[in-house]
């Protein structure tokens, strides 16, 4: 079951305890987090940590770790101290997920 961009933004807010479980987040809070999603994904891809193929079809195995990375990035916007240990752990888990994930690339055969 894949997750979407809006679910990722909501989950990051939940991790920051900005919204309670079951309560809808404020529209401006969602906008603040959503505005950073592309930058976080580009950063992770640029450093070869993890690649998100489609932000509207996020792999469930990476979803919580991506939400952690996003929450750490926006923590100061919500008056909280960024937890770099949480970010490091999340990035390490994303690297592990990337290493075990098939990329479905076509490999050319070499004939002798």
Image (spheres, grey):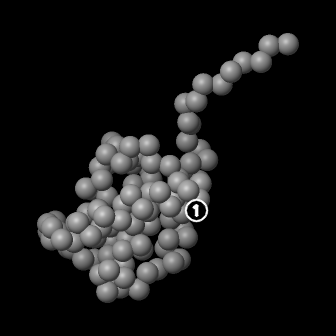
Secondary structure of residue under mark 1:
helix
In this rendering, the answer to whether 62 lies above or below 112 is below
User: In which quarter of the view is residue 73 placed?
Assistant: bottom left
Work out whether residue 91 or residue 78 is closer to the camera in this orientation and state it: 78
Q: Is residue 21 visible?
A: no
Q: Quadrant of the C terminus?
A: top right
In this rendering, the answer to whether 106 lies above or below 75 is above
Q: Quadrant of the N terminus?
A: top left
Q: Which residue is mark 1?
A: 92
Residue that lies at the very extreme toward the top in this rendered image: 112
Q: Residue 81, how many percent across, how many down?
A: 41, 86
Left or right, residue 80 beside residue 42: left
Q: Residue 22, how many percent across, how many down?
A: 16, 65
Work out whether residue 77 or residue 59 is closer to the camera in this orientation and state it: 77
Q: Residue at x 24, y 77 (%)?
A: 18
Q: Residue at x 55, y 30 (%)?
A: 104
Q: Residue at x 30, y 53 (%)?
A: 5
**Label 1 neighbour load within 10 Å: few <14, some 14-19, many 20+:** some
Left or right, residue 100 beside residue 80: right
User: In which quarter of the view is residue 20 placed?
Assistant: bottom left
């Amino acid at each position: 079951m894949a997750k979407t961009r809006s679910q990722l933004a909501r989950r990051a807010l939940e991790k920051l305890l900005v919204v309670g479980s079951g309560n809808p987040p404020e529209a401006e809070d969602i906008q603040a987090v959503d505005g950073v999603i592309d930058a976080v994904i580009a950063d992770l891809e640029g450093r070869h940590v993890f690649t998100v193929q489609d932000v509207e079809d996020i792999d469930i195995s990476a979803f919580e770790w991506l939400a952690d990375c996003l929450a750490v990035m926006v923590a100061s916007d919500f008056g909280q101290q960024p937890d770099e240990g949480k970010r490091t752990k999340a990035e390490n888990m994303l690297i592990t997920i990337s290493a075990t994930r098939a990329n479905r690339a076509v490999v050319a055969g070499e004939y002798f």
